[in-house]
Image: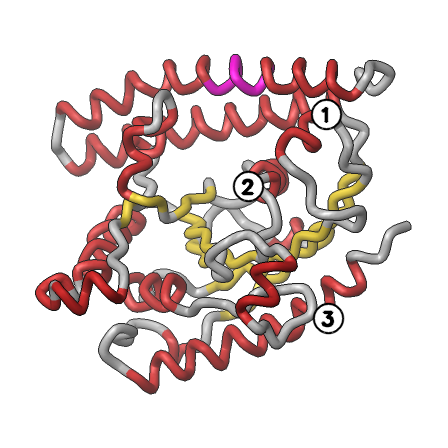
Amino acid sequence: MLSFLPAPVRGVIAAVLLAINTVFWCVLLYIPALLKLLIPIKPWRVACTRLIIMISEAWAACNTGWMKLTQPTRWDVEGADKLRRQGWYLVLSNHQSWVDILAMQRVFNRRAPFLKFFLKKELVWVPVIGIAWWGLDFPFMKRYSREYLIKHPEKRGQDMVATRKACEKFRFAPVSVMNFVEGTRFTPAKHAKAKSPYENLLPPKAGGAGFVLDAMGDAIETLVNVTIAYPHGAPTFWEFLCGKVPVIRMRIDTLPVPEGLKGKDYSADAEQRRNMKNWLGGIWQEKDALLKELNKAD
């Protein structure tokens, strides 16, 4: 434990360790990723994806190592014992900080299938990790604004087509499809602008989860409901690296996905959209009350 060092020094050490760890495992991951690209045979690509996931889990495990080395953060986690590696999960969480992603990877790693996020299509060109995301079959999506669709109505439904195509790759191995349904990180300004009915959350956007259940409703049986709290305030990524986060609290619950929400056309079925919105609204109401308790400092 390097907690005796000044916070900025710990931050630099943690950042260097994160960078080295990421570059090392990404370079190793490029080998099966390129083989996957060059040989377009489905069983071969499935095997390459499984090897890539093993490499990614090693990356996440090493991240946990430098966190333990550099940070005095206390992890208060309940419900991780409910997770299983052989399962198809829809994972929903509140979103306050970029730290959320590393925190979830630490807790979920090798307890559940590797977390996969929907990413903007442009992120495939991010240096080092863009190819890694592609190799992991992270879904790259191109979202169209409402204004754009008004001018180009022929593009309507393309997001659903892309979601279906991405989700087809998830049928060959257990997967945790992750979605931050608030759509952005919580801030007081965003909370006020959205006129949120919740005290600690932004209103959930049902589209992402609805599209996944539309495309994979026959495979995904379980919702993993994650609530992350930072009782001393949501940290920046640099504050996290510096070890300035006294405690991270996480509560994990597993719920069956209602049969009526699976495999229906979310984009075209107004009743399905209402049902999804109501279902998420109930979950968010309970999450809001839970966050109020979790945010109480020790």
Rendered image: mark on residue 67? none
List the single residue furthest toward the left.
154
- Which mark sits nearer the N-terminus, 3 or 2? 2
| Residue placed under numbered mark 3 in the picture | 289
Q: For this rendering, which residue is in front, 200 or 138?
A: 200
Q: Which residues are magenta?
A: 17-22
**Residue under pointer 2:** 101
The chief SS type of the magenta part is: helix
Q: Left of 39 or right of it: where is 189? A: right
Q: Nearer the viewer, residue 20 or 262?
A: 20
Q: Are marks 1 and 2 in contact (CB under 8 Å)?
A: no
Give the amino acid at mark 3: Ala
Image-quadrant location for residue 237: top right
Cα distance, mark 3 to mark 2?
A: 22 Å
Q: Secondary structure at mark 2?
A: helix
- 94 relative to 69 in the view: left or right: left
- Residue drawn at point x = 58 percent, y = 27 percent: 61
Q: Secondary structure at mark 3?
A: helix
Q: Crowding near pointer 2: few (<14 within 10 Å), some, many (20+)? A: few
- CA separation, marks 1 and 3? 30 Å
Q: How is the image coloured?
A: secondary structure
- Where is 218 relative to 71, above or below? below
Q: Which residue is mark 1?
A: 242
Please name which of the two marks, 1 or 2, marks the residue nearer to the observer.
1
Using a 10 Å C-alpha cutoff, classify the residue at mark 3 as few (fewer than 14 neighbours), some (14 to 19) or many (20 or more). Answer: few
Lower sequence index among marks 1 and 2: 2
Q: Nearer the viewer, mark 1 or mark 3?
A: 1
| Vertical side of 167 occupied by 265: above or below | below
Residue 192 placed where, x, y %?
61, 67
